[in-house]
Image (cartoon, helix red, strand yellow):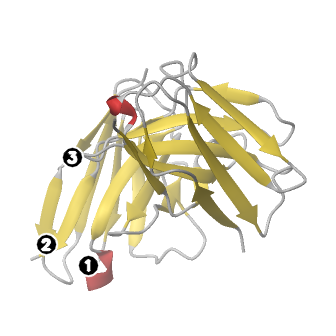
Amino acid sequence: DIQMTQSPASLSASLGETVTIECRASEDIYNGLAWYQQKPGKSPQLLIYNANSLHTGVPSRFSGSGSGTQYSLKINSLQSEDVASYFCQQYYDYPFTFGSGTKLEIK
Amino acid sequence: EVQLQESGPGLVKPSQSLSLTCSVTGYSITSNYWGWIRKFPGNKMEWIGHISYSGSTSYNPSLKSRISITRDTSKNQFFLQLNSVTTEDTATYYCARVVPGSFYFDYWGQGVMVTVSS
């Protein structure tokens, strides 16, 4: 199975800041990566697919980048509604696997 | 708009079977793929498996001997059965629409928490 190592586990930042969350795959996943946001008590919401494509309706302050084994999610101009957990998922190969999640809080 | 809603018992006894239903509105399950994912206490997430628009299935090898995903197209529902459950199967179970060919999840249900306990 492809292991997804996500960091950091938690993150505290101020409103208006830029934050970056990273996922490292145990092998090349050829941009087969999605990022999701899960707010407390809610279902996960797709943010990014194919490593860098913004899902419909997702604010442009979210962006994804990376290639090979290293990928990142960047949130520009952090807003209060961005408080959530974020996690990555590789879908390059079966079984599809997830990162361990990052909990984002406002400082 | 696509909406998914999980339903099923919140408590299952060890060694019994867990059966969940995902009801889909706003989209036919004879299009796309439809999957199950679970989130354990402590937040680890696991892909369980999916069923295609034609009814073919793919399962996580770690669960393959215990699971079955089926569907009822007349009701626009698909189902998860997990046999011989243990306390390790305690989790929140989500159903989701799968983007075919890419296999990420673009719409998710609210999730149903299932506890395995005697």
Determine crowd level at label 2: few under 14, some 14-19, many 20+ residues with C-alpha closer than 10 A.
Answer: some
Determine which of the numbered discs, if any, sits on residue A7 in the image. Answer: 3
- SS class, disc 1: loop
Amino acid type assigned to the residue bearing label 2 in the image: Ala
**Which comes sooner in the sequence, label 3 or label 2?**
3
Left or right: where A24 falls relative to B110: left
Looking at the image, the residue that sits furthest to the left is: A107
* Distance in Å between CA atoms under marks 1 and 3: 18 Å
Q: Could you classify mark 1 by the number of other residues whose Cα lies within 10 Å: few (under 14), some (14-19), or many (20 or more)?
A: some
Q: Which amino acid does label 3 sit on?
A: Ser
Residue B80 quadrant = top right
The answer to which of A19 and A5 lies nearer the viewer is A5
Q: Residue furthest front?
A: B118
Amino acid under disc 1: Leu
- Residue at left offset 15%, top offset 61%: A11
Dot 1 corresponds to which residue? A78
Which residue is situated farthest in the right direction here?
B74
Q: Where is residue B94 in the image (x, y as percent from the top left)?
A: 52, 51
Residue appearing at x 18%, y 50% in the figure: A9
| N-terminal label among 1 and 2 | 2
On the image, which quarter does residue B102 sit in? top right
